[in-house]
Amino acid sequence: MFLSCFESLWNCPAKSVPGKNPSDPIKLARLVVEASIGEPLAHRKYVVPLLQAAGWEKAPFSIAEQRCFTNPKGRIRVVGGKVVRGKPKRSDYLLRYRPDFPIAVVEAKANYKTPSAGLSQAKEYAEILDLNFAYSTNGKGIVGFDYRTGIERIVDCFPTPDQLWARLNATAPLSTSAIERVLAPFYHDAERLPRYYQRIASNRAIDAIMRGRNRVLITMATGTGKTVVAFQICYKLWSTCWNRNNDPVKRASNTARVCQI
C-alpha cells in the first residue's frame, strides 16, 4: 500500500506536493516519506529531540505533550436549541519549569510548512494559559514570541529552562524563598486536578503575596472552583512553611479573598 502511494506521488507533478516545489527527486521523495508518517510522528522525530537538547526532559523540568488544557469533552454551546460540544484546546507541547508551573507553549507544524505557521495558535494558547513565551516550529526552524517585550524573532534553538526563568524573573525579581513558594506543587487529588484557570488564579495570588501585597481579591464565576483555589493557595503557603515563625503580622495583614460574581 505504501509502495503504491509512493509511486503515485513520485509520478505526480512536483507542484502538487504541499509546500515547496523541489526539482530534485531526492528532495521530493523525502517530502513524500515525511508526509506519509503523519504529523504526530513527525513531531516526535524532529521536534522532541530539539526540546530534549535544551534540557526540558531533565527533572524537575518536563514536557507535557498533546494535552487538552480545557475540558476534554469540549465547551458546551447551544446551537439551534440543541446542546453541542466544541473542540477542546490542545497544545502540542507545554514546557513546565516545575510540575505545576508551565512557562511556555510550543506549537509544531508539518515540516513542509514555514516555522512560523503555528505561531498565531501558540500565542492564542499562551494568552489563555497566562504564559509569557510562545514558540512555533516545523522541526527545522523555530520562531518565538516574548510577551514581556512584544518581540517576535527567529531563534537557532529552544531556550533552556533556566534561560526562560531568568527572562521571566528579570523584570521584578523574587527572593529565593519567594521563588520556592511560587513554584511549590499543588495538592494533587486524582479526581479533582486543578483546572488551568484555577492554577492561574492560585499562582497569581501566591505571587502577589510574595511581593508584599496585603490584600488579594480573586473574582470568579459561580461553579468555577473558588473553594479549590482557596485551598490550593493555603496548601502551597502551608507546605512551604510560609509562616513558620508564627509571625502575627502575616496572619493579620495578608488575606486572599475569593469572591463570586
Image (tube, grey):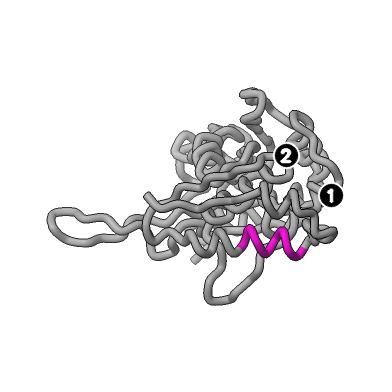
Q: Which amino acid type is shown beneath numbered disc 1? A: Ser
Q: Position of residue 252 (x, y in %)?
A: 68, 51
Q: Position of residue 65 (x, y in %)?
A: 62, 58
- Within 10 angstroms of label 2, few (less than 14), some, or many (20 or more) residues? some
Q: Is residue 119 above or below residue 233?
A: above
Q: Residue furthest left?
A: 81
Identify the residue at image location x=78%, y=58%.
243
Q: For the residue labelled by badge 2, is the local secondary structure a helix, a strand or a loop?
A: loop
Q: Which amino acid type is shown beneath numbered disc 2? A: Arg
Q: Nearer the viewer, residue 167 or 234?
A: 234
Which secondary structure dominates the residues rendered in magenta? helix
Spatial CA distance of label 1 from label 2 is 11 Å
Q: Mark 1 = which residue?
A: 177
Identify the residue at image location x=80%, y=59%.
246
Count of numbered marks? 2
Q: Relative to 168, is 245 on the left or the right? A: right
Magenta stretch: includes residue 169: no
Identify the residue at image location x=62%, y=30%.
147
In the rendered structure, which disc, 1 or 2, sits on the residue that comes first in sequence?
1
Residue 31 visible within the image: yes
Residue 97 visible within the image: no
Q: Which residues are magenta?
A: 232-239
Q: Position of residue 220 (x, y in %)?
A: 44, 51
Q: For the residue labelled by badge 1, is the local secondary structure a helix, a strand or a loop?
A: helix
Please tell me in which quadrant of the rendered image residue 79 appears.
Answer: bottom left
- Within 10 angstroms of label 1, few (less than 14), some, or many (20 or more) residues? few
Q: Mark 2 = which residue?
A: 211
Q: Relative to 33, is 180 on the left or the right? A: right
Give the number of the disc on residue 233.
none
